[in-house]
Image (tube, helix red, strand yellow):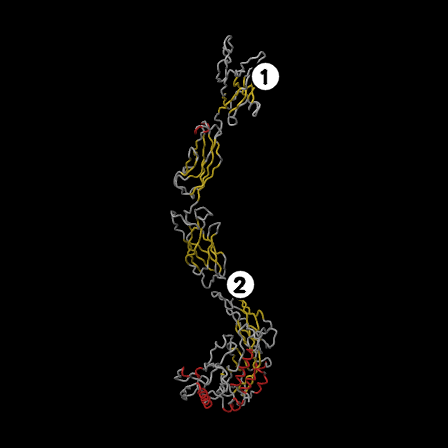
Amino acid sequence: MGPPLLLACLLAPLCARGATVPGSPQTWRQHEGLRRVKRAWVIPPISISENHKRIPHLLVQIKSDKQQPGGVIYSIKGPGVDEEPLGIFSIDKFSGKVFLNAMLDREENDRFRLKAFALDLGGMTLEDPTDLEIIVVDQNDNRPLFRQDVFTGRVVEGAEPGTCVMTADASDADDPETDNAALRYSILEQGAASMFSINATTGEICTARLGLDRETVGVYNLTVQAADMSGDGLTTTATAVIYLDDINDNPPEFTKEEFSMEVEEQAAGVDVGKIFVHDKDLAGSPNWLAKFTVLEGDPEGAFAIRTDPLTNDGVISVAKPLDHEVRDRFELTVSVQNEQPLEPAAPSSPRALATVRVRVRDVNEAPVFRENPRRVSVLEGAPPGTSVTTYTASDPDTRQLQTLTYALLYDPADWLQLDPHSGTVRTKRELLHPSAFLQGGWYIALVLARDDAEPPLSATGTLSIEILELSPQHPQLAHNWSITRFNVTHAVLAVLVELPEGPYSLPLLLRDSGTPPRERQELLNISVCRCGRDGTCEDGVLAATSAGAGVTLGALMIILGSILLLLVSPPLPVPTHPLPAVLAGLGAARARGRRRALRKGLLQRSGDDMRDNILNYDEQGGGEEDQDAYDINQLRHPELFSPRAKPPVRRDAPLSSATPSAPRKLPSSPSDIEDFINEGLEVADSDPSVPPYDTALIYDYEGSGSVASPLSSIVSSLTDEDQDYDYLSEWGPRFRRLADLYGQ
């Protein structure tokens, strides 16, 4: 079978020899007698424009050169016929005409490839299948499309020209090989300033000139266009929104130069007021956020300034309580700046400083007890009406005259009475030992002070009263005698009424400061006598009282030894407060007549060298090395010490116009110390009023101007032998050593 014999082309066919064009007067035939040659039919691609509206439309007619008596049956197959999309093409099976039955869209299908068949009536193939290609010709039927309707970009204010921001790109569905898809971009609208330009080919948008200022225009809205046919065809538009990023090119400024506000005194942590600022930079950014500093007017840091993050205003608050009476006005110099550093090219602001005047309003303040608690001492068994103390408060409101009144807020034993105007506290009755209202020898009361303001304010003071005890077994002694603490190691004994002359024995309660306290009762012998002009007891009284009413060195050593044994007796816990053992015997006695006790040398010869020093006990100190004592090395090594040029003046000796004797020569060797001391004792025995400086010690001398007569030299026996100390052995093993030293 030879090559196919096909068709007459109706639109633009290219026919080989032997082809017949319909309507043509020539037809194909075979010349008899000639040799048959091979013929080949070529059907070039058939072009049809998309969107062709005249349908059905004849595209081409095909014919086979193998005509049969019964005729030829033609058919086509392929996309658009029996494959999707169906029904676009059809063929007349007898004439071979191919028709277009629907409009074409090049953007959906730009070409179709079909197969053409020629069959006899019996269905046998007469020709090999022939390719039939239909090309859809593009038309400019698609507008350009931007990738998005709104393009968003950012650029910093003050950017240089040529700084690119974004690209507004578009696409066209038409044939990219034709001018139908050749796009050009332009900016249709951007405002009068024309600060931006667009690349016509790429759609890239960049800055066009200087002068971008966010504070003037913060957002630019551009209308961008894309057109095909190289700008002459179909068009479309989009919006380009460009935001300017802020820089710190505007310093903050106070809205005015002076601000005034006021605050109540004693108010701490409260807000006083606001100082207002304005900043053109972006609100909420570090370029806008203000930072305040107090430059002058607040050296003590009484005020603080914080920034309100929402309004950017400065909030002034009180950092320390203010006192109207100390200072009622403040004038602060405040500066403001941003958290972010200012751009170097930005102008400085003349309104970066402001003056803030703060007035401190006076308010009523509560009274104040400057001494709180107040600690005083009262003798046990003190009679009603005994003055305890005057406990008053002060009013801080010095510029407002207010009257304070006082009342007892807490008086558990109903023991005290209080003057409501003066604050004087007195006893209403006796308070004897033991009492359930005493805590470790202390009575606690509370005093209320109230002012007369509206509303009134008050304060509470604690009154701690120490109850001193002459002896729990002899409360009647409080009517004649009183004992008060002088310091941590001494107490003062005084008479309250005029007493007859003669000897007196006072029982003393000695108590240490341990927890619990250790105590012991001791007797103190005191002589009341009539004094002569020179301040000494008259001889008759001395003779009457020389039988043992005085206190000698032996008696003093007994008392000291008793205290020492009490203090060192185990176990003694560490004291919680410095309450020393009370020792009365070297205090001052008060009487209406001027009395002085007889003097007598206190040192007696002893066969034992008890200690090198005289020590103070119950001081909780550093031991024997922490003492202010007499150094006996001066006697043992006299060559190391220069002799005194003039003997010291004895304050416990009566005034006398006699010339004091010259100092004796110090011993040349330690072996002569005993003779040196004996000579001194002999001098003391012969002239007791003016003893040498190294043979007697002074205890608790109060001076010649004291109201109470001194008891530094209590009338005592002329000799230690007059005292009977054998009873000490009955006190226990701790006192046997004293009994051996001073007993008969």
Is 126 on the left or on the right of 171, as rendered? right
Q: Earlier in the sequence, mark 1 or mark 2?
A: 1
* Image coordinates for residue 624, horizontal then vertical, percent: 49, 77
Numbered circle sitting on residue 124: 1
* Image coordinates for residue 25, horizontal then vertical, percent: 50, 10
Q: Nearer the viewer, mark 1 or mark 2?
A: 1
Q: Secondary structure at mark 2?
A: loop
* Image coordinates for residue 225, horizontal then vertical, percent: 45, 33
Looking at the image, which is closer to me, 665 or 662? 665
* Residue 467 occupies quadrant: bottom right
* Residue 515 occupies quadrant: bottom right
- Residue to which mark 2 is pinned: 454
User: Which amino acid lies under the numbered mark 2 shown in the image of this protein?
Assistant: Glu
* Image coordinates for residue 12, horizontal then vertical, percent: 48, 18
Is 670 on the left or on the right of 122, as rendered? left
Looking at the image, which is closer to me, 593 or 379? 379
> Residue 666, can we see it?
no
Q: CA distance from mark 1 to mark 2?
A: 129 Å
Q: Secondary structure at mark 1?
A: loop
User: Which amino acid lies under the numbered mark 1 shown in the image of this protein?
Assistant: Met
